[in-house]
Image: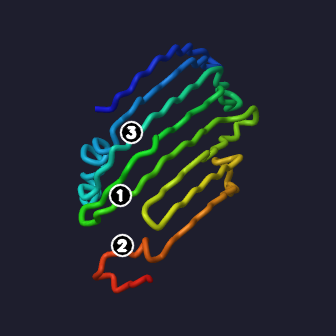
C-alpha cells in the first residue's frame, strides 16, 4: 500500500468551504510503485531495479469561495533523494535525484519549481531545473535550465552492441 498520512478539517458553508488539510507520503519505495502499479500497464518496468524512495508533502489551508472559485493556499513538495536505477542487461547503474515544489499565489496561479533533477552515470552527468509561473494557463510558459556533460567512450558502455553504435 501507499504510506499515506492525511489530516484534514473541513467546514462546509453555503458560499465557502474552509479547508485545513495536510497529506504526507514518506519514503514510498519506487520499486513497489513499479511492481504494484506501473507493471500492470507497462510490463517492461519489471526490468528496472532501484532503491529510490518518494516523499511528498501537500498542504491546503484557507477558504474556497464557491462563487468566485478563489482557491485556498495550496502547496506541495516532492523529493526523491539520490538513488540508483539499474536496467536488466546493463551492468552499470544510473544515479538520480529529484526535488520539486508546487504552490499557488494570491491570483490562483499554480507555480511549479523543479529545483533539481540530476542524473549521472559513467560518461554522463545531467542537471535540469526549471519553473512555470502559471501551470494551468491556456498556454503556460516554462523556464528550463539544463547542463549536460558526456564522455562518449565511457557512455558507449551503456549502448547495447546490437544498436550498431560505436563511440571512441
Q: Which residue matches tag 3?
A: 53
Position of residue 128 relative to residue 89, above or below, is: above
Q: Are marks 3 and 2 in contact (CB under 8 Å)?
A: no
What quarter of the picture does the C terminus occupy?
bottom left
Q: Secondary structure at mark 3?
A: strand
Q: Quadrant of residue 62?
A: top right
Q: Secondary structure at mark 1?
A: loop
Foreground: disc 3 or disc 2 = 2
Foreground: disc 3 or disc 1 = 1
Q: Residue at x 56, y 13 (%)?
A: 11
Q: Residues within 10 Å of mark 1 (few under 14, many from 20)?
A: some
Is 122 or 130 nearer to us in this picture?
122
What quarter of the picture does the N terminus occupy?
top left
Is 154 or 36 nearer to us in this picture?
154
Residue 136 appears at what percent x and percent y?
A: 64, 47
Report whether 86 appears left or right of 110.
Answer: left
> How many tags in the picture?
3
Q: CA distance from mark 3 to mark 2?
A: 27 Å
Q: Which residue matches tag 1?
A: 93
Q: Which residue matches tag 2?
A: 157
Q: Are marks 2 and 1 in contact (CB under 8 Å)?
A: no
Does label 2 or label 1 sit earlier along the sequence? 1
Residue 114 appears at what percent x and percent y?
A: 60, 47
Amino acid at each position: 500500500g501507499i504510506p499515506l498520512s492525511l489530516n484534514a478539517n473541513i467546514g462546509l458553508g453555503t458560499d465557502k468551504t474552509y479547508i485545513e488539510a495536510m497529506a504526507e507520503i514518506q519514503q514510498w519505495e519506487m520499486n513497489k510503485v513499479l511492481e504494484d502499479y506501473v507493471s500492470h500497464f507497462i510490463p517492461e518496468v519489471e526490468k528496472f531495479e532501484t532503491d529510490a524512495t518518494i516523499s511528498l508533502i501537500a498542504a491546503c489551508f484557507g477558504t474556497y469561495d464557491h462563487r468566485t472559485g478563489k482557491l485556498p493556499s495550496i502547496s506541495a513538495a516532492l523529493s526523491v533523494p539520490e538513488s540508483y536505477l539499474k536496467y536488466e542487461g546493463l551492468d552499470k547503474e544510473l544515479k538520480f535525484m529529484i526535488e520539486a515544489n508546487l504552490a499557488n499565489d494570491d491570483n490562483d496561479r499554480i507555480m511549479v519549481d523543479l529545483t533539481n533533477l540530476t542524473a549521472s552515470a559513467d560518461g554522463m552527468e545531467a542537471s535540469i531545473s526549471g519553473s512555470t509561473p502559471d501551470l494551468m494557463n491556456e498556454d503556460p510558459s516554462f523556464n528550463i535550465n539544463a547542463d549536460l556533460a558526456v564522455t562518449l567512450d565511457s557512455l558507449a558502455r551503456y549502448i547495447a552492441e546490437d544498436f550498431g553504435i560505436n563511440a571512441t
